[in-house]
Amino acid sequence: MSKLVIVGTCAFDAIETPFGKTEKILGGAATYIGMAASKLNNVDPAIVSVVGEDFPDTYLSLLKDRDINIDGLEIVSGGKTFFWSGKYHNDMNTRDTLVTELNTLENFNPKVPASYTDAEIVMLGNLQPQVQLSVIEQMAKKPKLVILDTMNFWMDIALDELKETLKKVDVITINDEEARQLSGEYSLVTAAKVIHEMGPKYVVIKKGEHGALLFEGNNVFFAPALPLAEVFDPTGAGDTFAGGFAGYIAQAGDTSFETLKTALIYGSCLASFTVEKFGTERLESVTREEINKRLHQFKQLVQFDIHINN
Ligand code: AMP
């Protein structure tokens, strides 16, 4: 089994899309990452996070039942769980954040369980860059690969800390607008170069329904998103992508450009399930068979033969 340490939020989300609205439901970056990674074979994921006393036991069981280790999930007595609320625009590609209540996340001091400090892959999900850095520093030996995901929220309020953390990171996964914000460059190719100089050897830029790009020096790879008939709720798609991506790398056991290319496809494949229902609902139920079927669809989507005349 390949150990995968995941840090990120475990949250309550309230979501509004053109198709409906939810009350507080299970969400959070670490939740989606953990659930997605748990779908890969021979991967042993552990979540490092914090919640309040209001986090239901049923949510904890949901994680445990998927063999996600939660020894590093702190429950603060009397505390309130991180809460996020968002509303999607009609195109479903953009959203407004309505509420971000950090609650227990505000004073979070992450503790990686001793049995996971030797994990080879570390997935730093979206939360304070200082917390992400603390997780790297707790690893007993240098991991094979440290992957970081973040968002504009942290660039706005903790840019210097984010830049410090990035110096210790091998792969960054961010969306196109965030790549532009972080680099100050409009072209994604130039943005990737600028971000590369901040530390990460690999830069992954997520473009929602338009797929994802992987940059390493002059190497570029593109993974499409699967064209879907029904997109219900994109929340967690980026985190699910990160979970499938990190999970595949843990499963493969190597960190070459070729492996990361396949990881990009796994990430896109898993994310395509998340958007089909509200919250984690679809990801909870997806089977290995369904994943494999969709991987075949991905293959067909991008495979072509071309005869180039001189
Ligand atoms: P995504 O749609 O992949 O960008 O991720 C949405 C998830 O990120 C939701 O489940 C939220 O709980 C979580 N989230 C939203 N804002 C933040 C934030 N500032 N820090 C950490 N997690 C967040």
Image (cartoon, rainbow, N blue to C red):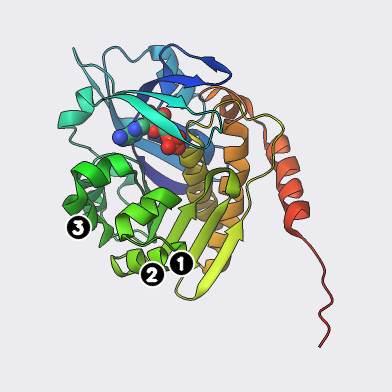
At label 1, which amino acid type do we have?
Val
Residue placed under numbered mark 2 in the picture: 193
**Label 2's element?**
helix
**Residue drawn at point x = 50 percent, y = 29 percent:** 89
**Cβ(mark 2) to ligand 1 < 8 Å?**
no
Picture coordinates of residue 181 (x, y %)? 32, 53
Query: Which amino acid does the dot numbered 3 rest on?
Result: Glu
Image location of residue 25, percent across then percent down: 44, 16
Mark 3 highlights which residue?
164
- How far apart marks 3 and 2 lie (CA) works out to 18 Å
Name the residue that disc number 1 marks: 189
Q: Residue at x 49, y 76 (%)?
A: 218
Q: Is residue 282 left or right of residue 147?
A: right
Report the Cα–Cα distance between label 2 and label 1.
Answer: 7 Å
Residue at screen point 56% across, 21% down: 18
Q: Is disc 2 surrounded by few (<14), some (14 to 19) or many (20+) residues within 10 Å?
A: many
Query: In this image, 182 relative to 177: left or right?
Result: left
